[in-house]
Image (cartoon, rainbow, N blue to C red):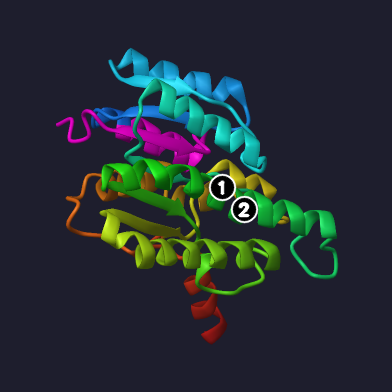
């Protein structure tokens, strides 16, 4: 269909999980994709798959917690393409210590910088392109933890993802006059490598019942392909077999 032919998309956290799926699907739609993540090898693998299918991919590895590294990617996009139409602000992290009793100042710093500061850095780089074009869409991966508070995700991750939700809505409040749309995607449990950081292991059986990376990637593609006249401000995508709901039902029995 190539609905995004001529567009440039920057996908962070693109080496695995939701970011990988989103990058592949945006490339299928004809977008030239800039892939960012911490590790070169997974990004190279995703880029090779895109190119093998006839698509365009550029690899720009970086630690997005470093604002100078984010600015450098912006400079690359400006020189290589001269435009940026889509930001998939997907990079994020969690840590194993998820209770106040064991949370350190270093852990807090990692969670805030890895989930909120890095996302905001990428927005500051993306917006000037989009303002000049009077067009652009930013899609941020938050989490159910961005709207609900539970012990599962931990206080630091929860607080940071609440910040991502607020960030996205604030972009629409200021930038709607510039033709810019911002959407925050709130997945429930998704079978991605971040599950390996859970304090309690998640079984293969449970992972199979969760939302999959390609489910969220397809949603991101849908949002990116919408006409400029509409914005999906916020959307949840969760497993039908929602383990928190199931646990609540079992407590009632």
The span shown in magenta is 1-26
Above-or-below relation of 114 to 31? below
Crowdedness of circle 1 by 10 Å Cα count: few (<14), some, many (20+)? some
Nearer to me, 230 or 54? 230
Q: Nearer the viewer, residue 63 or 40?
A: 63
Measured Cα–Cα span from mark 1 to mark 2: 6 Å
Which residue, given by chain and number where applicable, does mark 2 sit on?
117
Q: Are marks 1 and 2 in contact (CB under 8 Å)?
A: yes
Percent across and percent down for residue 191 are 50, 47
Res. 159 in view: yes
Q: Quadrant of residue 199?
A: bottom right
* Residue drawn 34% across the image and 59% down it: 175
Residue beneath the point at 57% across and 37% down: 70
Query: Badge 2: how crowded within 10 Å, few (<14), some, or many (20+)?
Result: many
On residue 121, the disc is: 1
User: Residue 105, percent across and down?
Assistant: 83, 60
Q: Is residue 134 above or below residue 46?
A: below
Percent of width and height locating residue 168: 43, 61
């Amino acid at each position: 269909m190539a609905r995004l032919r001529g567009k440039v998309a920057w996908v962070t956290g693109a080496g695995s999980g939701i970011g990988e799926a989103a990058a592949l699907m945006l490339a299928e739609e004809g977008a030239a994709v800039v892939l960012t993540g911490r590790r070169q090898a997974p990004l190279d693998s995703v880029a090779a798959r895109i190119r093998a299918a006839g698509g365009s991919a550029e690899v720009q590895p970086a630690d997005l917690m470093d604002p100078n590294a984010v600015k450098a990617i912006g400079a690359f996009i400006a020189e290589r393409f001269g435009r940026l139409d889509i930001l998939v602000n997907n990079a994020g992290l969690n840590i194993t210590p998820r209770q106040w009793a064991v949370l350190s100042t270093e852990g807090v710093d990692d969670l805030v910088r890895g989930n909120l500061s890095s996302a905001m850095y990428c927005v500051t780089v993306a917006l000037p392109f989009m303002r000049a074009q009077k067009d652009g869409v930013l899609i941020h991966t938050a989490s159910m933890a961005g709207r609900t508070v539970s012990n599962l995700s931990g206080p630091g991750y929860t607080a940071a993802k609440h910040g991502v939700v607020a960030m996205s809505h604030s972009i629409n409040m200021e930038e709607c006059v510039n033709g810019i749309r911002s959407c925050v995607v709130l997945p429930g449990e998704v079978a991605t490598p971040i599950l390996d950081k859970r304090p309690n292991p998640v079984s293969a059986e449970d992972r199979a019942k969760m939302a999959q990376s390609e489910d969220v990637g397809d949603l991101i593609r849908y949002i990116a392909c919408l006409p400029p006249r509409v914005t999906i401000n916020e959307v949840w995508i969760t497993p039908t077999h929602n383990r928190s709901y199931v646990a609540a039902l079992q407590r009632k029995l």
